Amino acid sequence: MESIVISGGRRLRGEIDLQGSKNSSLPILAATVLVRGVSVIHNCPDIRDVDAAVKILRHLGCLVKRENDTLIVDSTEISCYNIPETFMREMRSSIVFLGSVLGRMGIVQLSSPGGCEIGLRPIDLHLSSLRSLGYTIDEAHGSILCRRVGDISGSVISLSFPSVGATENAILASVISKGRTVILNAAREPEIKDLADFLCSCGCRVEIGSQGTVAVEGVDSLHGCEHWVIPDRIAALTYMAATAAAGGEVLIRNVDTSAFLSVLPLFEGAGCEIKDKGNSLLITMRRRPIAVRDIRTMPYPGFPTDAQAPVMTMCAVAEGTSVIVENIFESRFKHVGELIRMGAEIKIEGRLALIDGVKELYAARVQAQDLRGGAALVIAGLCAVGETRVENVRHIDRGYERIDSVLQSLGAEIRRINDE
Ligand code: UD1
C-alpha cells in the first residue's frame, strides 16, 4: 500500500504535458476487440485502469505490447468470451467490454459490476440497448449472459438518460451488423466522439449528430488502424483546480480546451487568469480563490461530475460560500469527511454541498476512497499547513499518471512512500 505525503504551502509553477484521456482509452481498448488485426493506440496513459483493460484484452486472447505511451493490440485471435469477476471488480468500467465482445463473438458472459464507491451504478440502460438491438440476455446469480440470435440488422435505441457507458456499449454492439442503428439521447462527451473516430478509422461509419444522436452504419468486419487518444480533460481540470487552490502559474501543454470551454468561466470567476493558447493553457492564480456560487454537475457539456471533488477543494479555501449540487452520482461526496478532518467547513444536504471557505486547511492523515476524491485530498495537502498523508493512493493511480511526479515538477513538496 502506498501513500502520498505533501508538505503544503508551496505555490505551483512550471509546465506539464497532459496525459491522454482515461475515459477515451478504456472504450477504445475495448473496441480493439472488434478489430481482426492490429490496433496502434497512441497517447494511452500509464494508469491502473488501462492496466486492468490490458489484462482483460490478454485474457480474451489479444496480444498487447506497450511502447512508451503507445499500446499495440493484436486482436487477430480472440479465444474467449467470458470476463471473470476479478476483472469486473478491479475496474467497474470493464462493463464496456460487454458490447465489444458481443459484437466480435456473438456471445459474452460477465459478472454484474454492482455498485461502487460513488453510487449504485445500475446497467439497465446498457442491457435495454442490447435488447433493442436484438440480443438476448439472461441474468442469474450476479452473472450476465448475452447472445446474438440471428443477424443484428440495426435498430433505434432511445436512452432515457444520456449514459456514457450505455452509449458506448450500444455503439460497440451495433458496429458489426447488417443495418443502421440510431441512438437517441446519446451521451455527448468528447470521449464518445473519440471512440467514433477510432471506429471510423477501422472502416466503420459512426456519425455524431449535434443533438445527442449517434448513427452507426453496420459493417461485416473492421481492420486495424493507428489512433491518437484525446487529451484528458478531467486531468486538465484537476491540475487547474490545484493551481487555483495552491496559487501559482502553470502551463498545461497538449490540452484541448474546446472539450471544457463551459468550465473555464468558473475558474475565471474564482479569480484565475486563463490564457487559452490553442493546444496549451496558461493558468495564473495570484490571490486566494473567490467562492463559486452555483456548480451543478450535468451531462456534457455541463460541469463534469469527475471534476466536482477537485474543484470542491478549491472552494474549501475560497473567500465566501460556494454551493455544489451533484446531479449525476448519489454517493460522490466521500471526500468531504476527509476534507473536514483537514479543517474544511462543508455541510452536505442530500445532493447539495455548502462550502464555507476557510483561510487555511491543516494537515492530517486522510484516506482516498475513490479516484477523483483522492485527487481532491492531494490538492488539499498542497494548500494545508503541515504534512498531509493521503493513504490508499491506488485509487488515485487508477486515473492519474504519476500525480506525485507531475506536482513535484511544479515545485510541490510531495513524495510517495510505501506504507509497509
Ligand atoms: C462515465 C465515466 C465516469 C463519469 C461518468 C459521468 C468512463 C470510464 N467513466 O461513467 O468517469 O463520471 O461517465 O460523466 O467513461 N445510469 C443508470 N443506468 C445505466 C447507466 C447509468 O441509471 O444503465 C446512471 C448512473 O448510475 C449514474 C448516471 O446514470 O447515476 C451516469 O452514469 P454514466 O453516464 O453511465 O457513467 P459511466 O459510463 O458509468
Image (tube, grey):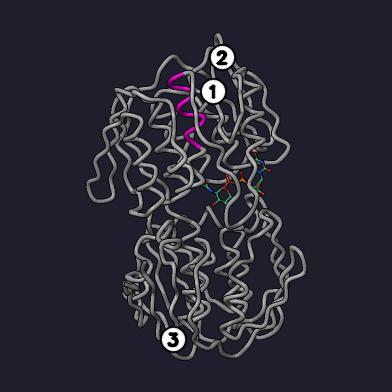
Q: Say which amino acid is labelled 2.
A: Ile
Q: Say which amino acid is labelled 1.
A: Ser
Q: Residue at x 76, y 64 (%)?
A: 350
| Residue behind mark 3 | 8
Q: Secondary structure at mark 2?
A: loop
| Residue behind mark 1 | 174
Residue 360, horizontal then vertical, whole percent: 56, 90
* Label 2 residue near ligand 1, CB within 8 Å: no
Sequence-earlier tag: 2 or 3: 3
In which quadrant is the C terminus drawn? bottom left
Q: Say which amino acid is labelled 3.
A: Gly
- Residue 223 visible? The answer is yes
Sequence-earlier tag: 2 or 1: 2
Principal secondary structure, stretch drawn in magenta: helix
Distance from Cα at disc 2 to Cα at disc 3: 57 Å
Residue 88, horizontal then vertical, whole percent: 48, 42
Numbered label attached to residue 152: 2
Residue 141, horizontal then vertical, whole percent: 59, 33
Viewed as shown, does residue 243 lie left or right of 351? left
Above or below residue 214? Residue 221 is: above
